[in-house]
Image (cartoon, grey):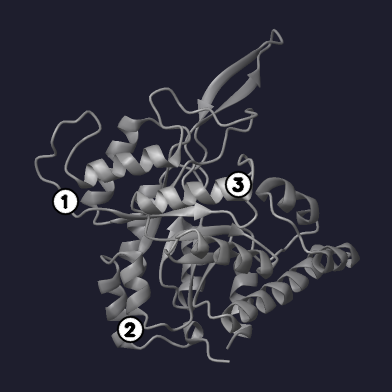
């Protein structure tokens, strides 16, 4: 089976990649000429950890010629510490700073197009405005706009005071910025290159949506507000993705819907993944996971399952696959090699 992403990159392709840095994602996909390819998502390093491990990961994955790299964002959240008198003190912490700096460093060091996350969670409208300015100064014009997760101590998402409650609010701010206006309505004297953006979607519905239909209505609204593509939450049953896409098209959602895939690597994921990411594990996968005695057994199973998922997606005409690589870098590499 042909899988061009794992072939050595010719010099002409490397030069083309540098040009792709300034394209929108839709232009990047069109530039690829319909070939099979993938992207991957990485986390900024923990505060004080440095970039060595992250850059090693990107060096390994760059060999597979990804079209772009997503960089997640984690803003501040409240944590509680116990005082000597037994009372709890609440204060804000931010464990993973540097998304914008990491995006700029990856783009410069590796010549890869980057798409950082910009989120509502844990930040204000004013801070988002400065993020947009910084990204514009750095020549980064492709974004993934998300609400972000609720804080660990919250039962439901609570926006930061002076922040956004919904992704649609964030989209409206970015659109207004593109039109040449700050959030307070004052004009931007020298508007730069406008941002293009995508959003997330959920083949098994967002955890807070009352049903899938309502969730997909929100996706349609985001498309109508300017979203150029959507990336799915991870899923392990391809039929749910196919059903989601079919229903989306029937609703008038025409933007690319890029499937998100993650190879399982640990026994604990049998219960952690469905709880954390609100996606079901197919009975066949769950049964095989229960037979695994070690994490290494799970890693082998995860590679096999993800490989078959990708092959099936390709057989159904999908050309763009997005990998979630956290704790699964080696597995992602193995999946790509098996698809040669």
Q: Which mark is residue 192?
A: 1
Which one is closest to the eye, mark 1 or mark 3? Answer: 3
Q: Quadrant of the C terminus?
A: bottom right
Residue lying at 68% horizontally and 46% vertically, measured from the top left: 276
Q: Label 2, on which residue? A: 13
Q: Which residue is mark 3?
A: 206
Query: Residue 305, how many percent across, how many down?
Result: 72, 73
SS at mark 2 in the image: helix
Which is more N-terminal, label 1 or label 2? 2
Q: Residue furthest left?
A: 189
The image shows residue 176 at horizontal and vertical percentages of 24, 41
Mark toward the start of the polypeptide (1 vs 3): 1
Marks 2 and 1, Cα distance to the nearest angstrom?
28 Å
Out of 198 and 328, give the one closest to the viewer: 198
Report whether 44 appears left or right of 286.
left
Alpha-carbon distance for marks 2 and 3?
Answer: 38 Å
Q: Residues within 10 Å of mark 3 (few under 14, many from 20)?
A: some
Can residue 111 be seen by looking at this rendering? no
The answer to whether residue 173 is above or below residue 45 is: above
Mark 1 secondary-structure assignment:
loop
Q: Give the side of residue 49 with respect to residue 30, left or right.
A: right
Q: Place residue 331 in its image quadrant.
A: bottom right
């Amino acid at each position: 089976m042909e899988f061009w992403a794992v072939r050595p990159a010719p010099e002409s392709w490397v030069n083309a990649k540098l040009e792709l840095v300034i394209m929108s994602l839709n232009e990047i996909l069109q530039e690829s000429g319909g070939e099979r390819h993938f992207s991957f998502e990485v986390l900024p390093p923990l505060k004080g950890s440095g970039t060595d491990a992250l850059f090693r990961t990107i060096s390994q994955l760059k060999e597979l010629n990804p079209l772009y790299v997503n960089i997640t964002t984690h803003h501040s959240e409240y944590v509680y510490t116990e005082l000597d008198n037994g009372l709890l003190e609440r204060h804000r912490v931010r464990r993973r700073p540097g998304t914008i700096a990491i995006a700029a460093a990856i783009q410069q060091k590796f010549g890869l197009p980057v798409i950082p996350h910009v989120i509502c969670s844990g930040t204000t409208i004013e801070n988002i405005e400065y993020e947009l300015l910084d990204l514009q100064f750095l020549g980064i014009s492709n974004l993934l706009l998300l609400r972000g997760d609720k804080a660990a101590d919250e039962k439901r998402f609570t926006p930061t005071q002076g922040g956004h409650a919904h992704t649609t609010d964030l989209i409206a701010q970015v659109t207004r910025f593109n039109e040449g206006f700050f959030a307070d309505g004052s004009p931007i004297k020298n508007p730069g290159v406008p941002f293009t953006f995508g959003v997330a979607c959920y083949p098994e519905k967002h955890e807070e949506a009352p049903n899938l239909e309502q969730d997909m209505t929100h996706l349609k609204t985001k498309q109508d507000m300017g979203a150029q593509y959507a990336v799915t939450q991870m899923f392990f049953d391809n039929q749910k993705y196919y059903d989601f896409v079919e229903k989306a098209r029937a609703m008038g959602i025409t933007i690319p819907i890029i499937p998100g895939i993650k190879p399982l690597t640990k026994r604990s994921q049998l219960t952690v993944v469905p709880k954390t990411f609100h996606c079901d594990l197919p009975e066949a996968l769950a049964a095989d996971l229960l037979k695994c005695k070690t994490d290494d057994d799970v890693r082998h199973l995860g590679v096999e399952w993800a490989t078959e998922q990708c092959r099936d997606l390709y057989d159904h005409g999908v050309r763009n696959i997005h990998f979630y690589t956290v704790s699964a870098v080696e597995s992602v590499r193995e999946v790509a090699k098996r698809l040669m």
